[in-house]
Amino acid sequence: MIRPITINDFICLPEPIPLVDVRTPAEFEKGRIPGAFNIPIFSNEERVLVGTTYKQVGREQAILLGFDLTGSKWSAFIKQALEISPGKKIAVHCWRGGMRSGAMAWALDLYGFEVYLIEGGYKNYRRWSAAQFEKTYQLIILGGMTGSGKTRLLHQLHATGEQVIDLEELAQHQGSSYGTMNKMLQPTQEQFENNLAFQLHKLNPDRLVWVEDESLTIGKRCIPNPFWYQMRSSFLLNLNVPHEHRVELLAREYGALDKNFLIECTERIWKRLGPEQTKNAILAIEEDRMPDFIRIVLVYYDKTYKTGLSKRNKERVVLLDLDDQDIIANAVKIRASVQELNSGK
């Protein structure tokens, strides 16, 4: 049986159903619905051939070519679907709910699958994603200068049951010139948006949502404008952590990284650091003087943060001193501060 279903109804199903994306590997790599499996009906090259035939010759010839290209593949398609869903209950989509997903749904239905066919395909998921960014959320922005331990505190808050959106985790970048940490590979912009929308949908709108203060861009990924504007207008809890505590934290974190990586990243910001400070920073890296390296680059990052902070509505910024290095105690203090803030509204 083939059951047409909207993307919103599919995402809201009480029990998850495996989702198969039948677009090409290239389309899938650019952006996909989180959790989807790829069973491409056409290879990247075959899709180009079919598309060209459709435009230059006509629809019927393109369909015939499509069957010629996939004739021997259908057994493998069904076997892959069985591996994904042994219970023979599956959802299927292509770009916009056209011939590719229709053909796959027909074949799986013929074999005995219960098939949910996503109306409008991936194109409708992109519309659904955009709609999530337009919704209103009860955001609390966790700010503070580089090295304040904001990400660690977000994770601690999440461990205590708070709702958290970790934008740096989604973007696979820690926001600074050293943000890839020599190991992270950023998703495409499209996939970053897809993943963010999926997480936002899971939130309880009646509860607070904790988000780390970020620039509009995280590495090469851009926060969707509607959500970014909401972040900028929300309350900012500005964590004031002693300078040496920040140096200690960053020295431990960056000290584990490859020296060549740190030097390359430092050289990329030489115009901001200045030639003399860049030289001193690189020398400190080479000589394993991590605290000295951190102190040099923090001058630049602290100045940048203060500039950004000055552009916010001062009435929406709350300063919170964190002198203790105990992350659990600090998370408790942060929650208490926000409770006090909400009670005073």
Image (tube, rainbow, N blue to C red):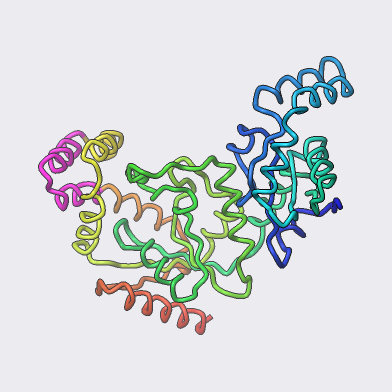
Tell me if 84 is positioned left or right of 169 in this view. Answer: right
Establish if 124 lies above or below 145.
above
- x 16%, y 42%: residue: 285
- Judging depth in this view, the residue of 257 and 101 nearest the camera is 101
Tell me if 151 is positioned left or right of 255 in this view. Answer: right
Q: Position of residue 71 (x, y in %)?
A: 78, 27
Tell me if 15 is positioned left or right of 331 in this view. Answer: right
> What's drawn in magenta, residue-wise?
275-299
Q: Position of residue 165 (x, y in %)?
A: 51, 61
- Judging depth in this view, the residue of 313 and 240 nearest the camera is 240
Number of numbered discs:
0
Q: Position of residue 17 (x, y in %)?
A: 70, 57
- x 86%, y 52%: residue: 1
Residue at the far right: name it.
Answer: 60
Query: Would you identify the image quadrant in which residue 330 lies?
Result: bottom left
- x 23%, y 49%: residue: 256
Establish if 5 lies above or below 258.
below
Establish if 186 lies above or below 130.
above
- Judging depth in this view, the residue of 269 and 92 nearest the camera is 92
